[in-house]
Amino acid sequence: MPVDFMDELRRREQRVVGYFSDPRFRDWFRPEHLQRAVYAYIERPGKRLRPAVLLFSCGAVGGDEDVALPAAAGIELFHTWTLVHDDVIDHDLKRRGGPTVHEQGRQMGAEELGLQPAAAIDYGNDLAILAGDVQQGWSVCLFAELAAKGVPPEVVLSLIARLESHVLNELIRGELLDVQFATLDLDSLQQDAIIEMLWLKTGILYEFAAMAGAMIGLATPDTDDPTVQAIGQFAAKCGTAFQLQDDILGLVGDERALGKPVGSDVREGKGTTIVYHAFRQAKDSQREFLKRVLGNRQADDADVAQVMRLLRDLGGVEYTNTLAKEYIAQALPCLDGLRPSPSKELLLAWAHFMIEREF
C-alpha cells in the first residue's frame, strides 16, 4: 500500500473530525452522559474510510472536496450510530481501543450514579440506544448543511431521501439477517445468503458514500446517472470485500491494532463464509465441536481458541480471502470510464487497501 494513500486517508480523517469538533454541535447534547456517549467513538482514532470514499469520489468526477465535507462528516456519523447499536446487539465491550458506548454507560451508571450491577447494565444499554438515535438525527442535519456550501437543494434532498429510505432499511435488514443467521443450524447456512447479508450490512453504505460524492461533484440528483452508478458499484463490491476481510481479521488479526476483541465472532456465532466453508470441509467430530462452541457465549477460552484454529486449518480463512480478492477484481473495471486523476488513483488504492489491511 503506497505511503501516500495512508497520508491522504489521515488528512481526510483530520478534516472530518475537525468538522465534528465545532462547538456549536457539542452544545446540542445534554445531559453530560449523553454528550460523552455521542462523542465517544468519533473522538477516538479511526480509519474514516466511508467519508474518505465520499471525498475521493467527489474529486474523481471533478468536484470540490471542501463542498462535500458536510456529507463526509454525515456519512461517518451515520456509520457511527450503527456501530453503537451493533455493539449493544453483539454484547461487545471494546471498540476503537476503548469501552463500547454501552459499557462506558454502565461504568458511568455504577461509578457516578451509584447504580447496582444489573441497573448499571440497563442504564448503559439505554444510554447507547439513545446516543445512537441522536447520532442518526445529527447525520441528517449534516447532509442538510450541504445547501450552505452551494450544493443544489434537489441534490441535497435526493441524498437525504435515499439515505433515510433505501440505505437505512436495507442496512437494518442486513443487521437482522446477521442476528438471525447466528440462530441457524450450521447445516442450513448458504453462501449466497451470507454474501447478501454482508452487502446489506456493509456494502450498501459504501455504495451510498461513493454515489453521494459523485452526485455532489456532478451536481446531479439523479441516482441513475451512469457515472454515479459506476462509482457506486465499484464501492459496493469493495465494501463487500471489506467485510470479508473484517471477518478474517476477527480470527487472525492483532487485537491491539483492531481495537476490538479477536474471537468474539465465535462466541456470537456469526454466520460467515469462513464458517460456511470450514464446516463443509470438517469431519463429523469436528462439525459437532463447531456446533457446540459457535454461538456459545459461555464457551471457555480454550474451546474458542480451538474453533479459531479449526476454521483456519479447514481452509475457511484462505477461502474467504480468495472471495475478497475476486470482489476487488470485479470492482476495478467499474472505474474505467473515469478520467485519470489523483482522486481516481486514491479510489484504486483504497480498493487494494480493503484486502491488504491489518486493522
Image (cartoon, grey):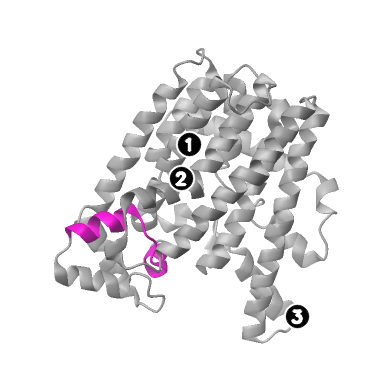
Residue drawn where x is 30% and y is 65% of the image: 186
Tell me: 200 left or right of 80.
left
Of tags 3 and 1, the one toward the viewer is: 1
Secondary structure beneath dot 2 equals helix
* Spatial separation of the CA atoms under disc 2 and disc 1: 7 Å
Sequence-first tag of 3 and 1: 3
* Spatial separation of the CA atoms under disc 3 and disc 1: 44 Å
Sequence-first tag of 2 and 1: 2
Image spot of residue 342 (x, y percent): 53, 18
Residue where numbered disc 3 is placed: 113
Magenta stretch?
A: 263-281
Given contact means CB atoms under 8 Å apart, are the residues at marks 2 and 1 in contact? yes
The type of residue carrying mark 1 is: Ala
Tell me: 353 left or right of 224.
left
Secondary structure beneath dot 3 equals loop
User: How many numbered marks have been drawn onto this rendered protein structure?
Assistant: 3
Residue drawn where x is 46% and y is 56% of the image: 256
Residue where numbered disc 2 is placed: 199
Residue drawn where x is 50% and y is 50% of the image: 201
Residue drawn where x is 52% and y is 69% of the image: 91
Quarter holding residue 130: bottom right
Secondary structure beneath dot 1 equals helix
Q: Characterize the local packing of mark 1: few (<14), some (14-19) or many (20 or more) Cα atoms within 10 angstroms.
A: many
Residue where numbered disc 1 is placed: 236
The magenta stretch spans residue 266: yes
| 323 is higher (above) or lower (below) than 335 | below
